[in-house]
Amino acid sequence: FDSCYGPKTEQDVIYRNDVRPLVETVFSGLSATVFCYGVTGAGKTHTIQGSELEPGIIPRALEHIFMHQKRDAYEYDIRVSYYEIYKEAVFDLLRPRDTVSAAGLPIREDANRRIFIAGLSEKRVTSFEQFDAMYQKACGNRRTASTKLNNHSSRSHAILTVQVQWTDDVGPGKTWCGRLHLIDLAGSEDNRRTENGKDRMAESSAINRSLFVLGQVVEALNTGAARIPYRDSKMTRILQDSLGGESLGMMIVNVAPGDAFLQDTHNTLSFATKSREVVNKPVAHEVVEQRWTVSDRLQHHRGFALPSRSAMVSAPLANGVGKRRRSDEPGVDYEHSPAGSTVSDGVADIQLGARRRAIPGGRHSDTGALGATGTAANGQQPGLRRTASAAPRQADLVQRAVKAKVSELEQRTESASNQIMERVMRIEQQLSTKQLDSDV
């Protein structure tokens, strides 16, 4: 692993060395995910959430984002959602528990095959103080209970998603969107040691089942299996983009000390080792407004409110990923690898993460592995690695030809749509007088 920290290491050191570089990628239009994984009572919630005296990754990341917003010229739209997966049901933590359906929220897939949670609230935040007040209240809605191994055991997986959107002031003024997912996974439990009752046993069974499916997904990705079992668990379904998808990934592995946890520590580190081999393909996300369909035009003509038809498209990583870089901004090289380990409250954490280093000449390169990018025997970096360079002249000609063809097709589609609308309006007008022409 890239880093390993002792039990006396402060939260700020862990965030500054390993997590902060990954948070920075959000301002390039990328998606990034940070997991906390480990056995129950190992300190995952403390690492991701922290305390009033020792804030964890979530408050530090949001404070970092708002500090970036203050010193940047762009107008950022920052939105937050927070939810838990409890016994294979999704619940919105930003809403009072008594107002949430017992069946939970459904998981859907949009036209671009992106996973989303239908009905999940998304709050716009403009300051860290506003976020912190909302976050502290939401944490009180999360389900916790006391077990023999942990007096304050999390009984669900909790996922905080931060969306940062802005419009580029260079060139055509494209709108970009970066996302940050901060995840506190519930710990695996051995019911023989926790001495759980009926209710706690049902919860631990759901937790262990979802973590087992997570292991199956990682194994299937590493072996190149024809079927990846994302749908076997709500958690892996939601995190599909972070597991072999288009998101950058970092895993923080919390290890509990002591002989009693020897087997748990071995299993945890074995899973982390396998996770290193998962390769993601990070891309920048551009927000585009889709063209109106004939149905949209009809609704607009008849006075109905037109629904928003925005969509996310993936742009390949290149010079000036996402937010296009100004001339005075240096190139950045992101090397994503399972970063090192942390510890808080007497618990060792091993972090798999991302390193960032500036390189001269404004060149940009990246790797997108949920795992280390260590040097192989032949001196090459394993996993995905792409370096942006000037496109050949032939590629430019092909791109221009494609753009011209697309523009031609758009004009023909617009013309056909206008003709259809004229005929529809003509039919409606003649229906009102109960007279139809023979050619209609």
Image (cartoon, rainbow, N blue to C red):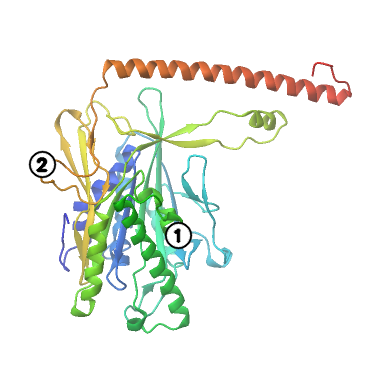
Vertical placement of residue 371 versus 184, above or below: above
Query: Which quarter shows the N terminus?
Result: bottom left
Mark sitting on residue 379: 2
Which secondary structure, mark 2?
loop
Q: Residue furthest front?
A: 226
Q: Residue furthest right?
A: 434
The type of residue carrying mark 2 is: Gly
Q: Nearer the viewer, residue 74 or 217?
A: 217
The answer, for residue 308, to whether it is visible in the render is: yes
Measured as percent of width and height from the top left, residue 180 is found at 36, 49
Residue at 42% x, 73% y: name it.
205
Residue at 13% x, 46% y: name it.
376
Q: How many marks?
A: 2
Measured as percent of width and height from the top left, residue 81 is found at 45, 53
- Residue ID for mark 1: 232
Measured as percent of width and height from the top left, residue 198 is found at 47, 82
Measured as percent of width and height from the top left, residue 285 is found at 39, 37
> Left or right: where does residue 328 sit relative to residue 167?
left
Please tell me in which quadrant of the rendered image residue 308 appears.
Answer: top right
Mark sitting on residue 391: none
Vertical placement of residue 315 versus 242, above or below: above
Q: CA distance from mark 1 to mark 2?
A: 38 Å
